[in-house]
Image (cartoon, rainbow, N blue to C red):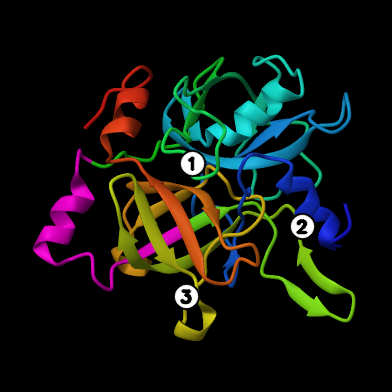
Amino acid sequence: MNAIKSLAVLAMFSMMAAPALAITNGSPDGNDHANVGALIAEWRQPGVKEQLCTGTLISPTVFVTAAHCTSYLESLGIPNDRVWVSFAADVDPVPRSGLHAGKWFTNPGYNQRQSDPGDIAVVVLAKPAKGIPPARLPTAGLFDEMAAAGTLKNQKFTAVGYGVREPLIGAGGAEFPWDGTRRVAVSEFNALSEVWLRLSQNVATGDGGTCYGDSGGPNFLGAGDDETDIVAGITITGDAMCIATNVDYRLDSAPARAFLAGFVALP
């Protein structure tokens, strides 16, 4: 795939119920977040495996991602056991080795509306992903507790994903570079609601964030020396040009925990 795609990339991901987001104003991740993987499917051409979204290993066999990713595959008539996860640092092209076969399970409460509070899914791997330490889930209501204690203000979060980067604006419009590399960026707390964690990704204030291709990917609590392996929320949506806000589904919320409890032990 070419290193730079124009609005065709935007159109490709916009076919989903909500924008599929990717890393902006960040840097290549290398092997720093080995438990962050690419959701792989033959979604545009039979026999050709391509990255669709991002997600995180939260147990040796459970990979959490966004429901609008798996429901999109379902809308194409793709069976739920025709999906793979790659934890490679670069998925352009998708490596033939190291693919983990699995089966997706979309939250049955998801109704395919943008910013749906049921926008969560998992892929259950056929075999444990050996040698990859799973990320941790937050405890129930963690961010409500932090807000009450006044510790959410100025809190940093670390976004990881495989999608397109910040737009390049030219005479022909916006172009969104994509090269299949897992990238990382740091965002800052913006706002909290019952199920949503909103993060600033405004480069003018030193923030990075997500864009097309990162849906389902993690936003870890903390950054730099203070980064934890706790997935605060999964990337769901944001502004169309990927320059302002990353909207994440809180994994400490009651709806998220109710769904995840069917697949993993909760903290």
Q: CA distance from mark 2 to mark 1?
A: 20 Å
Give me the disc on residue 35.
1
Label 1: few (<14), some or many (≥20) within 10 Å?
many
Q: As drawn, is 171 to the left or to the right of 213? A: right
The secondary structure type at the circle numbered 1 is loop
Side of 177 relative to 224 (left or right): right
Residue 2 vs residue 252: left or right?
A: right
Q: Which residue is mark 2?
A: 179
Examine the structure image and report whether residue 51 is included in the region drawn in magenta: no
Tag nearer the camera, 2 or 3:
3
Asked if one can make out residue 68 in the rendered structure from this viewpoint, the answer is: yes
Q: Which residue is mark 3?
A: 207
* Magenta-colored span: 139-158
Of badges 3 and 1, the one in the foreground is 3
Where residue 194 appears, as percent x and y from the top left, is 28, 46
Residue found at x 49% / y 49%: 235
Q: Is residue 93 left or right of residue 101?
A: right
Labelled pair 2, 1 in contact (Cβ < 8 Å): no
Q: Position of residue 47 (x, y in %)?
A: 87, 24
